[in-house]
Amino acid sequence: MSPKPGQVDRAGLVHAMSDIFEGLKAAFWLLVALDRDLVEITLRSLQVSLSALVIASAIGLPFGTWLAIRRFRHRRTAIAVMNALMGLPPVVVGLVVYMLFSRTGPFGVFGLLFTPAAMIIAQVIIITPLIASIAHQSMRELWADYHDLLISLNTGHWQRIRTLMWDGRRALLTASLAGFGRAIGEVGAIMIVGGNIDHATRVLTTAIALETGKGDFALALGLGCVLIGLAIVVNLAIHRLSRTERDGRW
Amino acid sequence: MVDTILPLVLTGAVAKRRGKRLIGPIDAEIGPVGFTIVMGPNGSGKTTLLRLMHGLQRLAEGTVDWQGTQIDVQKRQAYVFQNPIMLRRSVKENLSYPLSLRGVSKSSATKTVNDWAGRIHLDRALEQDAMMLSGGEKQKLALARALIQKPDVLFLDEPCANLDGRATREIEELLLETSRAGTRIVMATHDMGQARRLATDVMFMLQGNLHEFGAAKQFFAQPETPQARAFLNGDIIE
């Protein structure tokens, strides 16, 4: 008997719960068995997202800091554009990168399309504005605190940027981690530029999309659990390595 | 390089914010020796005058002339703010920061830092987070960080505001020692007793103008204007 409008479909709920349980079970066995495909996909996910993170941080963190201390014409416009770019639709980024690196595109000669390199480029474009924007926000506050002192000490431009970045490194770490979160969970752009090719460009998110399309919800959910676990592990590892809590003031 | 960047000569110096006059026009000369106290009621322009002389406040009209090149002038003066600005680092790193900017070697900087930490009684707190220090300790650290640069001129904006008697005495002793060693000090204060203890000359500010400027003894014994007399008597003037 089908449920009345506004009534919970109990059978559907049981089915969904069963799928989730099966997914958790699948994730458990994938991890316990150290499935070769899973390890390969996971490592590729890490390689692509961490590479994008390093490149985007190297660009976004100094740029956000520079924007916090530098006064120039149209500065507000530049900040507004940067903040707007945080919401770049990944599919559009993927499409643009695809066109740029396709055989007829201006960078087609490099032959990067459907390689992890193209996926990294797309992710760098997506997460750099996010990292720069969060970095800018926190560096602006720190600059307000330090402004008079650093001017009084007659510091140069790069000395100011270095000082702010060092003293605000925990806030910058948060900016980078936000970028990592967006990169590791991104699917639209890397699907387009990577092509989800088995043993070449398949990563966790594209694999989940594929398994969902095939109707294998349990495996898709299992991969999802692995993805969430991976994001948590990387975050914890970075926090631990940078000793954010140990050096905290409370 | 010149021996000293003084005298400092202000000629018709005016500071404005959004077109509105903050202080000036001010004409004054700060000679190479002495301890100048800047006094006046709240909002009279003491802080703006200090910032103008130091270069933190943009000059709208007139001139502020030092001796020597611009780089010399910038390097040979220091400023201590009313609310001490601490770098989010340890005490040691706060002290060594100005030295690192000047390219002083690490070993030489360590020796100087240890020496200064001892002088301000923070030698046991070298590794401590500077943000965790008490108000008095922060102000002493800010003062030491300014003095470690061996400035010709030191500007201080009410450095003992909100400090207890003991901390105030420690800072005053350090300032007198610094003054005797040849550093020219220009300091704003509300504390009449402190002004009498330290000043060799006084700048009295009122409504953005330099109302009186002369020897401290003369100012405290026989102020020239009724407003200065009223201020010294503790009357409320605006």
Image (cartoon, coloured by chain):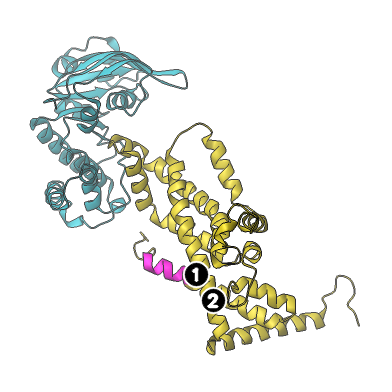
Q: Quadrant of residue B67?
A: top left
- Identify whether A162 is placed above or below A194: above
Label number found at residue A47: 1
Q: Quadrant of the N terminus of chain A?
A: bottom right
Label number found at residue B234: none
The percent coordinates of residue B88 (x first, y second) are 33, 51
Q: Is residue A150 visible?
A: yes
* B179 on left or right of B10: left
Amino acid type indicated by mark 1: Gln
Query: What color is chain B drawn in?
Result: cyan
Closest to the observer, B26 or B222: B26
Q: Chain of mark 1?
A: A
Q: Is residue A236 within the magenta segment?
A: yes
Amino acid type indicated by mark 2: Thr
Query: What color is chain A drawn in?
Result: yellow
The percent coordinates of residue B170 (x first, y second) are 16, 41
- Identify whether B171 is placed above or below B65: below
**Disc 1 crowd, CA 10 A, few/some/many (<14, 14-19, 20+):** some
Identify residue for label 2: A42
- Magenta: main secondary structure equals helix
What residue lies at 63% left-to-right and 55% top-to-bottom?
Answer: A93
Q: Which residues are magenta?
A: A234-242
* A114 on left or right of B190: right
* A190 on left or right of A238: right
Q: Chain of mark 2?
A: A
